[in-house]
Image: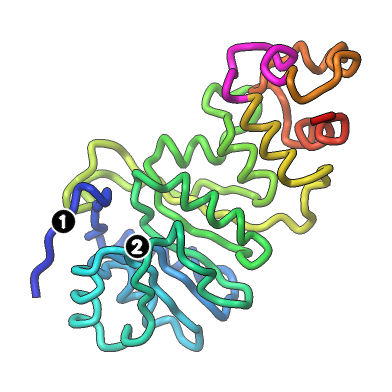
Amino acid sequence: MQYTLKKSLGQHFLKDENICRKIVAALQEDNFERLVEVGPGAGALTKYLLKIPAIDFKAVELDEEKVLYLQHTYTAIQGKIIHDDFLSTAMPFNETFTVVGNFPYNISSQILFKILEWYEYVPVVIGMFQKEVAQRIVSKPGNKVYGILSVLIQAYYDVEYLFDVPPDCFNPPPKVMSGVIRLTRRKEALYVKSRKQFFNLVKTAFNQRRKTLRNAVRGLFDADVLQDDIFNKRAEQLSIDEFAGLTFRMSY
């Protein structure tokens, strides 16, 4: 059974067996009972995941043609595919589950924001990203690529860059290098006034990252609070704990 590659879905299918095995080896460094694969595509990684013993496995795939291909090719996947858009699907399990995937690059950031909504249920994520995005996720304060994604992900997960993946490991080869990262949920949740205010502060601060914090977030604080020296900094200079601390001083 043949399948077609759909550019509109950002499809770059992994074909390098060694990379697949490396991802599965990294995955198995943690114990888990339930696993969700995002975007299995033609099943390069899926065929290894289906062999992991004693776990509940589900794969979320939007493309109907790939769903039919997977069902035709891998008998062990019957009943384990959720034919849906990961960004709008219901949570696949009601108990904790690990997430893995060669994430479609055009929605990889949105996939992470979706996982953040479920973070209490998702202790570990191992994902393939465009290298530039992977580097952004793991970057630290003061780095020019440190931004919204870095702060919001690292507020809830410890991040680790695992390895590069060259373009020729895919069909078709993307024009960019890729990278695999691991997210491991932090043992203690970040102490913030509210999650909603924390997200709003971080997004507002970085949306005008060239400005000082005082000018970028003035609508969120009273004038007297804005006199504090911390507001002389720009967003990329603040640590995650500093952003968290500022939520308790927000007025709006």
Q: Residue furthest right?
A: 224
Count of all numbered marks drawn on residues in the image = 2
Q: Which residue is mark 1?
A: 5
Residue under the image location 31 percent in, 64 percent down: 62
Residue under the image location 71 percent in, 55 percent down: 186
Residue 3 percent location from the top left of the image: 12, 66
* Residue type marked 2: Gly
Q: Residue furthest left?
A: 2
Of the image marks 1 and 2, the number of the one nearer the N terminus = 1
Q: Which residue is mark 2?
A: 39
Vertically, is 47 above or below 127? below
Residue 73 percent location from the top left of the image: 19, 80
Residue 25 percent location from the top left of the image: 45, 67
Q: Residues within 10 Å of mark 2 (few under 14, many from 20)?
A: many
Vertically, is 162 above or below 46? above
Q: Is residue 111 left or right of residue 61?
A: right
User: In the depicted view, which residue is nearer to us: 165 or 55?
Assistant: 55
Residue 214 forms part of the magenta stretch: yes
Residue 50 percent location from the top left of the image: 37, 80
Q: Disc 1 vs disc 2: Cβ atoms closer than 8 Å? A: no
Q: Is residue 151 left or right of residue 55?
A: right
User: In the depicted view, which residue is nearer to us: 61 or 220?
Assistant: 220
| Picture quarter with the N terminus | bottom left
* Residue type marked 1: Leu
Q: CA distance from mark 1 to mark 2?
A: 13 Å
**Magenta highlight range:** 206-217
